[in-house]
Amino acid sequence: MNRFRSLWIAILLSWSLGPLLWQLYTSFSSDQALLEPLTSLDHRWTLTHYRSILNGEPPFWKYLVNSLIVSVFSTLLTLVLAFPAAYAITRLGKKIARTLSAGLVLAALFPFVLLFLALLEFARTFNLGNNLLVLCLPYAALSQPLAILILAAAIRDLPTELEDAARLEGFSLWQRVRWILLPLLGPAITSTGILVFLFCWNEYPIALTWISDSELLTLPVAIARIAGSSVYSVPYGAYAAATVLAAIPLMILVIIFQKSIVSGLTSGAVKS
Amino acid sequence: MKFMQLRRTTTTLLIVLLVVMTWLGLKTALASQTVDVKVLMPAPFADATKPLVDQFNQEHHGHIRLSVVKGPLETEAISDLAISSLLLGNPPFDALLMDVTWVPKYAKAGWLQPLDQWFEKAEFEQLAKGVQPGNEFEGQIVRWPFVASMGLLYWRTDLMDSPPRTPDELVNISKQLQADQKVPWGYVWQGRQYEGLSCVYLEMIHGFGGIWYDPSTGTIGLDQKPGLAAANWLTNLIKDGISPQAVANFAEAESLQSFKMGESAFMRNWPYAWAELQKEDSSVKGKVAVTTMVATSEENSAATLGSWGLSILNGTKHADETATAIRFLTSQSAQRTLAMSHGYTPTSTELFNDPELLTINPILPELSIALNHAIARPETPLYAQISDALQRNLNSSLTGESPSNQSMQETEISTEYIIKSAGGRR
Amino acid sequence: MIYLLLPAFILLLLVYGAPMLHYLWMSFHANSVLTGLMPEFNGGANWVRIVSDGRFWQDAIQTGRFAVVSVGVEFILAVAIAILLDQRWRGRGTVRAVTLIPWALPTTVMALGWRWIFNSPYGPLNQLTDLVGIETLNILSNPSISWIATVIGDVWKTTPFMALILLAGLQSIPKDLYEAFKLEGGGNWLCLRDVTLPLLQPYIAIALIFRLAQAFGVFDLIQVMTGGGPASSTESLSLYAYLNAMRFLDFGYSATLVVASFVLLTLVCATVWIIAGQWQQINQKFGRS
């Protein structure tokens, strides 16, 4: 194993990055070059795909902004709802806590795409469609299980003496939370926040059913919808350009926050 | 001195304010006069109608601005796009170019506006007879035809003097030609599991004197004698070697390719194939003619109607202007332009005899005849589901997985269940 | 204290609990464009229909096949990756970050990329086969093998997730256990089988069940990559339910499909859970932990 380690690492890297790098290559290739890879150099490289994406109607950055709005507000809403619930679970009796946790695990396992129909009817009845902020509600709801489990696990890991001491000193619940728990839970909150953010950013089926206005689309739906510009073929060059543009912010996010992501995933998944 | 400066600045500011407000006022006044009409079309049609749209906008400058929203290439994807907006109660388009099979569904859902306000019944009757089915719902016209298409039997003029008129004749002629080694295959058609197969089957079940499904009476004819005969006939084409096994995976493109290379005596396809067959790289250039599909009797001969038309979506704020745009895009001059530039089949009866169009498209007379035999697919909002049931079962017979009688029985049962579970009064 | 729980749990009940009950209720009603998209009681007509619905059963088998094969392949790859990342070497952190990238991207984004990669005849895969001299692979339009392409797409995206969980498990195993085992003369493969895997058992169970449940509900990848595939050969249960609602405007039948899918999913996961439990019992019996 050890002798070939460099080989394995190389394979792993090329497997993980390969398809993306291919998209990068495709995004700069002219349509002609895509069909005949050995085209002469003058017709090979082009920026037209990026231009068509960025100048599209609406322009690409609009989708990024929409996704950003939804993801940020959903994350905030999730944390605001999940934190008290996580705290409560850790302070309730063992039996109740275990039942609730089990319920949360079941909810986390549930493939939420099956909820699309009920959510669609909800949107139709209460006119909730095509509203980015309202979309945060189902997102926050779907993120609750994971968020509560991760936060509860983190809170449980904290030594209780600090909080007990504070309670004896007469600090109210809110004060204890604000001055003791929150600072100590920084890493856990970051992990949860990042994971929820990633989930909301990448979510597809619910955004697909709740948002139809092309100005309000989130990134995954917009990319799936890029209309054919040519009659005879799918515009793979344009898709590739969109892929690269969509991937860049996420890659940056992952590289910066990778420790958070990993710890969040493992603690949440494992401790449940 | 200061006071003078102050007065001057204030006056300048007031003048600037006045100018700005007048400009804004004019802009809003003009803007509120120009009505934006948006039509969603599949990409090929959007490209083809561009010159017409420009012409329209020139003629109606300042009043109406027509813009065509280019939708995805795939037919069903356009419908999905429109439906996702309509279900949320928020259509971003004023009009939609609709495939004929969507009309009952959209109309029943209440998404289409009746057109009788802007289009007279008399005008409708002026259209070619075959173009009329598929545009009405519960007695009202909800879609105005834009381009028509129908199923045709293509035959090789160098291999026979006259085309077969009955299914048996087609089989016999094919067998003879294949025995004489004149051509490897007798008949290529669309047998893949997709909507095209339903079109082929519809022509055959009518050809044998039956019907698929009649929504008004609830009759399903799939397991009756004509239905079984049609399925048997198609399955036997493959079994007896008249059509290659690959036909079970052919769509329009593959069957066209095969016929173009001279591999077959007959082909079932749409009018667009004619132009393809006259290209330089075609082995059968100049050796092809079209006629109506074979049937047990002249009146049973059927051509599946495939047509696109424009509908006004309910909820649009500019129905009048949209109607004007629709009238323009479907006018005789527009039809003439599209026929000349893209070979679209016209919808007005007169244009079929137009000498100029005849030079571009010499098979217009045959198209006109075929149009008279046009049959619409069952006009029910449940069409997509019953078509799916037919496609999968019939295709499994074509691939030899199950006997054709059994497939038709199963399709019949599935169709019944679909109708029953969807409720309502058909 | 309970009040702190309420907002979160009310939201959860609204979004998870209510819909499933609603679906069950709806499955006994007709709710289609023919009923004006309003529910009308129709007894068990939807259930009678689903029993003989060839497409439903085909999709059930396809989804099951997709889930099992995909998770199986992911598992093997994830074990290998986890073992690799568990060791200490320079640049491990960066490589781990890079490994995470496929998982962090939206599925739809890469789904189109995969469509291009498998494109016949222009995609890179076919360019490769051209170079080597193999016949053009028409994967995405071949009903028998297009599902394999979707499995590849899914494996690429979700292997990092499983690898991370297994990595956490590996990191919780004390290194002295390996040393002790090696001292007693155990080779690498035996070490894997008798030490690592049994100790990883809880992590494996979690990863498998979680991934299996998610894979059963696969939607994004299939809808964008193949749209259900040639002749519904890659169609998943959730996609069929979606099409019934959004394309056929048959909400009642769509609800029936969701309930049926959920039942199937529960059966499959319960089976895996029981098997995992049995395996743990067996391991404990033979004193391997």
Image: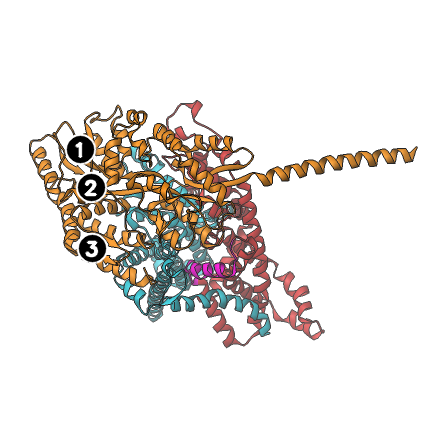
Chain colours: A red, B orange, C cyan
Task: Please identify the quarter of the rendering in which residue A44 is found.
Answer: top left
Which chain is indicated by disc 3? Answer: B
Task: Please report the residue visible at 33 percent of the width from the left and 37 percent of the height from the top.
Answer: B347
- Relative placement, left or right, of B189 versus C126 is left
Q: Nearer the viewer, residue A149 or C218?
A: C218
How far, Cα to Cα, is label 2 from label 1? 17 Å
Q: Which residue is mark 3?
A: B221
How far, Cα to Cα, is label 3 from label 1? 29 Å
Residue placed furthest toward the front: B122
Task: Tell whether position C243 is magenta.
Answer: no
Dot placed on the residue nearer the N-terminal end, 3 or 2:
3
| Cβ atoms under marks 3 and 2 closer than 8 Å | no
Q: Which residue is mark 2?
A: B247
Residue B64: percent from left, percent from top: 52, 37
Q: Nearer the viewer, residue B179 or B121?
A: B121
- The disc placed on residue A59 is none
- The disc placed on residue B155 is 1
In the depicted structure, whether residue A27 falls above or below residue B237: above
Task: Give the prevailing secondary structure in the magenta stretch.
Answer: helix
* Discs 3/2, front: 3
| Amino acid bearing label 1 | Trp
Residue placed furthest toward the right: B1
Magenta residues, as a range? A109-129
| Amino acid bearing label 3 | Gly
Residue C191: percent from left, percent from top: 36, 57
Q: Is residue B162 visible?
A: yes
How far, Cα to Cα, is label 3 from label 2? 25 Å
Q: Is residue B74 visible?
A: no
Dot placed on the residue nearer the N-terminal end, 2 or 1:
1
- Relative placement, left or right, of B418 versus A39 is left
Image quarter hosting the N terminus of chain C: bottom right
Which chain is indicated by disc 2? Answer: B
